[in-house]
């Protein structure tokens, strides 16, 4: 599997930067100093970089990008990547069939099933929180970018459409699209498409699985989504401790189905001041720090570092909310 975990890939870059001869403090622990805070780790609600960084290590999607490519994919919770050639994608581009990997365990126990996958997508789209990421899945699977109209009222029949959009057939999960939607495969790599444990989620107060009750779980107020501060994914790391505005601690999940991560513990420390983050990097108290563009020259001037600039995929936009 070619997927690179965020913490491990970042650690590799830092080690190359400080050189092979540098002494590494606590080699089983990776420390990231960051000033960005996390509002939620619910995959259905999180829609920022800081949240995604954490979710990608704890939860998994059906597929993921193949290395740096945005056009090729590798299977994660899916046993294979569906294509037209292998019959996973219909000729008309409106049906996608995913074979689900077996033997995958959740952090809190239990084993992944196709029903979990179906529940995850329905639950996420039903939640559809204001300002959240669900517009992507809703647009692809229902033809509407929201469960609500411009006045905030639930669109008649939208939950029935969601219910028909995803189904389990044996050991497969089938997505039914209203029309071909080429970006779907890329969307399925995003944290909003993370798979959760159906039984566990219902026990924690998430959607009860009855489509007739969906409206009760739609658009919860921020901070009131049941999975805001807890997780039960299938990823290589699990949440050990979260102290808001202080630190977020991951611990290696020993029951992980894939390659065993080399790093046992990962800590994201909340460090607001750049001067403190810089000092942590210089002293070896942090393996990686977040550096804003104005401070890049300071990092380049630090002795003992070999700087490796790598290409990044990003999108920057300016929004003007005006009536013209």
Image: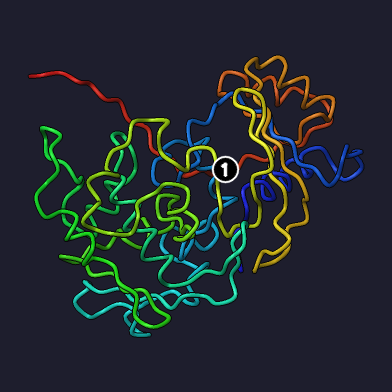
- Where does label 1 land, which residue? 54
Mark 1 is surrounded, within 10 Å at the Cα level, by few (under 14), some (14 to 19) or many (20 or more) other residues, namely many
Identify which residue, 218 or 147, lies in the foreground: 218
Identify which residue, 148 or 6, lies in the foreground: 148
Q: Is residue 284 left or right of residue 51?
A: right
Residue at the spot 76% in from the left edge and 39% down from the top edge: 17
Estimate the x, y position of residue 100 in percent, counting from the top left.
46, 75
Quadrant in the rendering for residue 270:
top right
Estimate the x, y position of residue 134 in percent, counting from the top left.
31, 47
Q: Is residue 141 left or right of residue 195?
A: left
Estimate the x, y position of residue 142 in percent, counting from the top left.
19, 58
Residue at the spot 38% in from the left edge and 30% down from the top edge: 222
Q: Is residue 154 left or right of residue 64?
A: left
The local secondary structure at tag 1 comes to: helix
Estimate the x, y position of residue 138 in percent, counting from the top left.
24, 52
Residue at the spot 42% in from the left edge and 72% down from the top edge: 114
The quarter in which the N terminus is drawn is bottom right
């Amino acid at each position: 599997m070619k997927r690179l975990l965020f913490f491990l890939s970042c650690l590799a870059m830092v080690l190359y930067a400080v050189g092979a001869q540098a002494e590494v403090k606590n080699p089983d622990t990776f420390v990231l100093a960051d000033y960005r805070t996390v509002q939620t780790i619910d995959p259905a609600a999180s829609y920022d970089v800081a949240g995604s960084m954490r979710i990608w290590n704890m939860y998994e999607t059906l597929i993921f990008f193949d290395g740096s490519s945005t056009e090729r994919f590798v299977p994660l919770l899916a046993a294979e990547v569906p294509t037209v050639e292998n019959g996973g994608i219909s000729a008309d581009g409106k049906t996608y069939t995913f074979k689900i990997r077996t033997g995958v365990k959740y952090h809190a126990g239990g084993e992944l099933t196709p029903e979990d996958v179906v529940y995850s997508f329905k639950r996420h789209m039903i939640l559809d929180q204001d300002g959240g990421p669900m517009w992507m899945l809703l647009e692809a699977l229902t033809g509407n970018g929201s469960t609500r109209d411009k006045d905030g009222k639930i669109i008649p029949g939208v939950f029935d459409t969601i219910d028909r959009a995803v189904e389990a057939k044996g050991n497969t999960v089938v997505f039914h699209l209203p029309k071909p939607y080429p970006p779907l495969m890329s969307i399925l790599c995003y944290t909003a498409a993370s798979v959760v444990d159906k039984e566990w989620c219902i026990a924690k107060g998430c959607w009860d699985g009855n489509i007739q009750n969906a409206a009760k779980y739609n658009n919860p107020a921020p901070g009131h989504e049941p999975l805001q501060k807890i997780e039960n994914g299938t990823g290589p790391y699990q949440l050990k401790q979260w102290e808001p505005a202080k630190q977020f601690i991951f611990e290696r999940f020993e029951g992980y189905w894939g390659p065993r991560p080399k790093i046992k513990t990962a800590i994201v420390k909340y460090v607001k001041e750049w001067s403190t983050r810089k000092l942590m990097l210089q002293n070896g108290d942090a393996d990686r720090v977040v550096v804003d563009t104005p401070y890049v020259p300071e990092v380049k001037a630090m002795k003992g570092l070999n700087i490796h600039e790598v290409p990044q995929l990003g999108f920057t936009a300016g929004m003007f909310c005006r009536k013209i």
